[in-house]
């Protein structure tokens, strides 16, 4: 055996020469695959998509591994029991739950069910853009109303645009990209004053990070008893399952049924249904992720304040702040330092959005921040 072959066998790890000789071709293949860098392992620190940098929990990871052997089967039978589980947790009937390939698919279903030519969507600006994209694909007009100076939805401004053709309003609370809250009682008043034919999506993707406060209460935990309200949630954030794709809506059966017609067949894959159920059961891990996020968010604010920077108060797993410099240049500076942060969010053209990552990633972020090649204005929004 020559030296390089011996070195390669050492890399394969263990075994006698005889057994290695017998198993060599198979092992070589499997190790070679194991050494392939994953496609996300491209050297960039990812602070750009508001993912859970620590998830999923070990218990959920076990379930994912155990389920992988059954992916030769279509997942159609997974729907019923998962809907029942989610319905039970939210104290609603299974026919009030609609599952999607991420909550993005749920937003698409809502857009195609309730929008179209001659119909109008009203949303905040800036906010999460998926619904706008689908509204335009459906041929609708989109009215975007700039958030207030405290970064809440400008509900009076939105109401001012509402008319008989406004069939859908999108409220993201906490809002992405600002991380800010719109007070619950203001949303309630707003809904009460909308035309009776206007449906309202309350996107609670970041619900778990909002905590309990006088101003925030989930429309799932404290429902309004109004058939026009559609609440959406995702498994992509606190549960750490963004790559597996699962989200859901809770609404009246009368609202779920027209949305369901736009669902892709078998839109819940065979792994995510099991993983999501395990994530819902792993309450301790969810609480740990929430606590960790609270601590990491506090640490981010400490680091920002130490640099006399004042981010927008965040109720999510990301933070937005004013750099007083064109955001595209700041984003590019971080990219050159191998750090991906959020994209541009007009009209907040000098703001950046930073997802909270692992401690070492955040240290890299602040190192790159300190190396920004221009003066930093400070302590204002
Ligand atoms: C507010 C909001 N809603 C929905 C989504 C979509 O989540 P997913 O399709 O992964 O469930 C995101 C993703 O970042 C988001 O920020």
Image: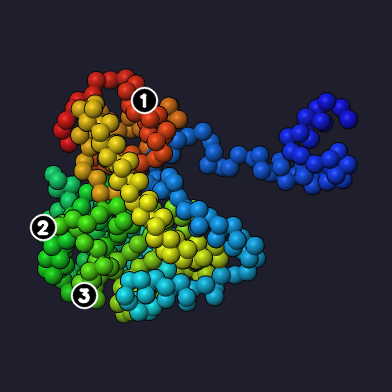
Q: Residue 163 location, x and y as percent?
A: 16, 67
How many angstroms separate mark 2 from mark 1 (CA)?
Answer: 41 Å
Residue 156 is labelled as: 2
Q: Residue 330 location, x and y as percent?
A: 33, 29
Q: Which residue is mark 3?
A: 226
Element on which disc 3 rests: loop
Residue at 18% x, 47% y is 151
Q: Are marks 2 and 1 in contact (CB under 8 Å)?
A: no
Q: Residue 168 location, x and y as percent?
A: 25, 66
How many angstroms separate mark 2 from mark 3 (CA)?
Answer: 20 Å
Q: Which residue is mark 1?
A: 367
Q: Sequence order check: which comes first, mark 3 or mark 1?
A: 3
Q: Which one is in front in this view, the residue at disc 2 or the one at disc 3? A: 3
Q: Is residue 231 visible?
A: yes
Q: Is residue 136 visible?
A: no
Mark 3: few/some/many CA within 10 Å (<14, 14-19, 20+):
few
Q: Is residue 311 left or right of residue 289?
A: left
Q: Residue 67 location, x and y as percent?
A: 59, 63
Q: Is residue 13 left or right of residue 306?
A: right
Q: Nearer the viewer, residue 245 or 283?
A: 283
- Establish whether ligand 1 lies closer than 8 Å to the Cβ of label 3: no
Residue at 20% x, 34% y is 310
Element on which disc 1 rests: helix
Element on which disc 2 rests: helix
Residue at 31% x, 56% y is 208
- Figure quadrant of the N terminus: top right
Q: Sequence order check: which comes first, mark 2 or mark 3?
A: 2
Residue at 84% x, 40% y is 16
Mark 2: few/some/many CA within 10 Å (<14, 14-19, 20+):
some
Q: Sequence order check: which comes first, mark 2 or mark 1?
A: 2
- Figure quadrant of the C terminus: top left
> Can you say whether 322 is above or below 57 in the image?
above
């Amino acid at each position: 055996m020559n030296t390089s072959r011996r070195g390669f066998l050492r890399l394969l790890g263990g075994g006698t020469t005889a057994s290695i000789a017998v198993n060599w071709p198979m092992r070589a293949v499997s190790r070679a695959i194991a050494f392939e860098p994953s496609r996300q392992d491209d050297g960039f620190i990812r602070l750009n998509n508001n993912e859970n940098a620590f998830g999923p929990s070990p218990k959920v990871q076990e379930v994912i591994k155990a389920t992988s052997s059954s992916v030769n089967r279509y997942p159609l039978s997974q729907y019923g029991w998962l809907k029942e589980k989610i319905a039970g947790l939210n104290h609603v009937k299974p026919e009030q739950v609609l599952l999607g390939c991420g909550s993005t698919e749920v937003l698409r279903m809502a857009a195609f069910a309730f929008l179209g030519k001659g119909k109008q969507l009203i949303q905040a600006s800036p906010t999460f853009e998926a619904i706008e994209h689908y509204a335009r694909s459906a041929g609708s007009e989109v009215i975007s109303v700039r958030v207030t100076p405290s970064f809440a939805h400008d509900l009076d401004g939105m109401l001012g645009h509402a008319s008989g053709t406004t069939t859908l309003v999108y409220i993201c609370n906490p809002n992405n990209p600002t991380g800010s809250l719109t007070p619950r009682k203001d949303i309630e008043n707003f809904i009460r004053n909308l035309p009776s034919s206007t449906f309202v999506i309350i996107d609670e993707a970041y619900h778990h990070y909002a905590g309990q406060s006088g101003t925030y209460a989930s429309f799932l935990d404290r429902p309004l008893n109004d058939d026009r309200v559609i609440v959406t949630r995702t498994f992509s954030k606190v549960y750490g399952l963004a790559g597996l794709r699962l989200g859901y809506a809770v609404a009246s059966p009368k609202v779920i049924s027209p949305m369901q017609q736009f669902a892709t067949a078998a839109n819940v894959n065979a792994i995510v249904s099991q993983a999501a159920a395990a994530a819902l059961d792993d309450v301790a891990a969810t609480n740990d992720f929430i606590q960790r996020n609270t601590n990491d968010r506090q640490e981010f604010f400490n680091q920002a304040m130490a640099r006399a920077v004042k981010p927008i108060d965040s109720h999510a797993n990301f933070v937005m702040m004013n750099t007083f410099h064109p955001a595209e240049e700041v984003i590019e500076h971080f990219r050159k330092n191998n750090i991906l942060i959020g994209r541009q969010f007009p009209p907040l053209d000098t703001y950046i959005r930073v997802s909270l990552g692992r401690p070492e990633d955040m240290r890299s972020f602040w190192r790159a921040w300190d190396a920004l090649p221009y003066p930093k204005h400070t302590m204002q929004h």
